[in-house]
Image: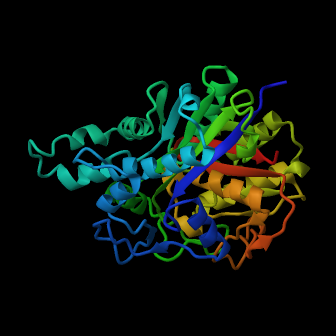
Amino acid sequence: MPPKIYVTGMGIISAIGLNVAENLTSLKTLKHGIGKPENLDTVHRQNLPCGEIKLNNLQLAQLAGINIGPDFSRTALLGMIASKEAMSNAGLTDSEKQNIGIVSATTVGGMDRTEMLYRNVTPENRNFIISHVCGDSTEKIADSLGITGFVSTISTACSSSVNSIMSGAEMIKNNLLDRVIVGGTDALAKFTINGFNSLMILDKNHNRPFDRNRNGLNLGEGAAYLVLESEDAVKGREDKILCELTGYSNANDAFHQTASSENGEGAYLAMSKALEKSGLMIEDIDYINAHGTGTLNNDLTEAIAISRLFGDNIPPFSSTKPFTGHTLGAAGSTEAVFSILSLRNRIIFPSLNFSMPMAEMPVSPVTELMENVVIRNVLSNSFGFGGSDSSIIFSEV
């Protein structure tokens, strides 16, 4: 029997809260964080709403408890805040932090610093070049946590942070580490706003996943991390166990650079293989936190894949992206935190703004907050450009 992997800590910062408690309150009160950006200097400020955290970098540094220089990206700062909360939540002692690693995900890296400084490079600020690469944010997060052993970065588009969770789980299962900090972080940048706008998949209004009249996504920023531990590592600290990571899988439909296949092959494979790994049956899944971006292609193909797998017995599902925006490399771990909150609080969070099912696949997400629901197993999806599709399953203990 394969060793069990437990989640013992989690931390998050997003457009709807600076920590886990604030995010849960916003989700329960249906308070979203989509609006005009204030910190990001973009020509699209008035017409492309997004999920921005309303703190500047100096305020984020204060929250993270550090002094920053020109080589500290917003991506790194967000990651420090969320990962420190996850570590604190897990309640690890100094000795328990010895054999610990980190696998952090990001897509934009330090692009925000590059955009601010590359036109005016001086001897004083040229260190921003270091922060540009994706791995720099991971190194800075590791330093802030005192992690000196295994440090790794994953960048696989929007499935990045779910793949970081899977990578950390494999490190534990192969007895390479006892504990791993896993998750992702991404900050808003002109690069992503302009890039997604050029693809014509940004909604000029509040996004509405799975709705017939959906018109694209809203971008967001944030970070979220989990602490994974082996069975042996958590002995004596069983009260810290939040849930078990029972299933996970990554698949690729090899169809298109930015679109998923018509039959949702990659999504179907990711979900079915995660289910197979968990040893659960389809009827055991009580809730699906869908990828649900609000784009024409993603929502239809994800709905098709869900229907292929679950048939006439589709469990309640919803997308939480209308709360936070699509946080790219942080989306999977953000929604992993939301999935665990659903599991532990017996709540299903709604898909905001939904009014009419898709004509091609008439399925409807949950549209109202559901409380006191029996939830034993939650499936969470994250699907990325290049066909990198990942699914994970969290189960009650």
Of the 4 image quadrants, the one containing the N terminus is top right
Task: Determine if residue 254 is in view.
Answer: no
Of the 4 image quadrants, the one containing the C terminus is top right
Task: Determine if residue 219 is in view.
Answer: yes
Identify which residue is drawn at 67% across, 50% down.
Answer: 381
Q: Is residue 197 left or right of residue 382?
A: left
As drawn, 107 above or below 326: above
Q: Is residue 170 left or right of residue 220?
A: right
Identify which residue is drawn at 67% across, 70% down.
Answer: 351
Q: Position of residue 170 (x, y in %)?
A: 65, 27
Q: Is residue 125 left or right of residue 234?
A: left
Q: Position of residue 247 (x, y in %)?
A: 75, 38
Toward the viewer: 337 or 64? 64
Q: Position of residue 298 (x, y in %)?
A: 62, 57
Q: Quadrant of residue 233?
A: top right
As drawn, 158 above or below 31: above
As drawn, 366 above or below 334: below
Toward the viewer: 213 or 371? 371
- The structure's colour scheme is rainbow
Identify which residue is drawn at 76% across, 57% down.
Answer: 344
